[in-house]
Structures are given as structure tokens and as C-alpha cells.
Image (cartoon, grey):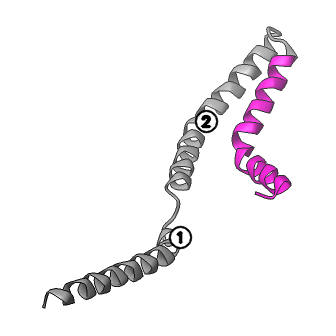
Amino acid sequence: MHHLLPARVNAMRIASASLLIMLVTCAPDLALAQASPFMTGASSLQTNILAWLTPVAIILVMVLGGMAMANRMSWGWCIGAILGIAIGFGAPQIVAWVRGMFGV
């Protein structure tokens, strides 16, 4: 009876090795089944930033218009504000364009 013990240990090792190989080969499928938490967080951050940026941009345009009417501003500030608003609201398209350029 004592000589059967190594056979059982061998069978257990083979079974556990087979189970480990099966788990390792199935792990990528399980990992790809869910959405990326980074993309979920980045999308949420983008939505929040755009929600805050909308009223700020509206107020900025009103202030720039008032300052332009009073002739109290440099047109460089106006161009900078317009570019900032365009970059803020066009960020998703800009990122998609850059990723397309580099094939990411």
C-alpha cells in the first residue's frame, strides 16, 4: 500500500498542472470580457470637464466681448481664448486624429 502513494502524488501533480495550463490559456479571454477601467474613468473625466467647461467658456466669451467693446484688451488674449476653447471642446477629435497618425 505504501508504494501506491507516489502514483497518487504523480496523478495529483499532473491534474494540477493540467488545470493550471487550462486556466492560463483561458485567462486572456476572461480579461478581455470586461471594459477597461481606465477608459471608463477617462470617459467620465472627459464628461465632467466638458460639463464644467461649457459655462466657463460662455462667461469667458461674454467677458472678452465686453473688454473688446471697451477697447481694454489685447487681441492676442482673444485669439488665445478662442484657441483654448477650441482645444477644450475638440480634445476627443484631436486625440483620435493623433492616435490615427501613429496607428495606436
Please provide percent x and percent y for residue 20.
Answer: 40, 75
Q: Residue at x 51, y 76 (%)?
A: 29
Query: Label 2 is placed on what type of residue?
Result: Leu
Q: Earlier in the sequence, mark 1 or mark 2?
A: 1
Please provide percent x and percent y for residue 2.
Answer: 14, 86
Q: Quadrant of residue 82?
A: top right
Q: Residue at x 20, y 85 (%)?
A: 5
Point out which mark residue 98 bears: none
User: Which secondary structure, mark 2?
Assistant: helix
Above or below, 104 against 77 in this view is below
Q: Residue at x 48, y 78 (%)?
A: 26
Query: Label 1 is placed on what type of residue?
Result: Leu
- The span shown in magenta is 76-104
Residue topped by disc 1: 32
Quadrant, the N terminus: bottom left
Instruction: Estimate how packed mark 1 is, as few (under 14), some (14 to 19) or many (20 or more) residues with alpha carbons within 10 Å.
Output: few
Above or below, 77 against 83 in this view is above
Most foreground residue, 34 or 59: 34
Left or right: 31 in relation to 19: right
Residues at marks 1 and 2 touching, judged by CB atoms closer than 8 Å: no
Residue 20 among magenta residues: no
User: Which secondary structure, mark 1?
Assistant: loop
Residue found farthest to the front: 3
Residue topped by disc 2: 53
Image label count = 2
Please provide percent x and percent y for residue 53.
Answer: 61, 35
Q: Residue at x 26, y 81 (%)?
A: 9
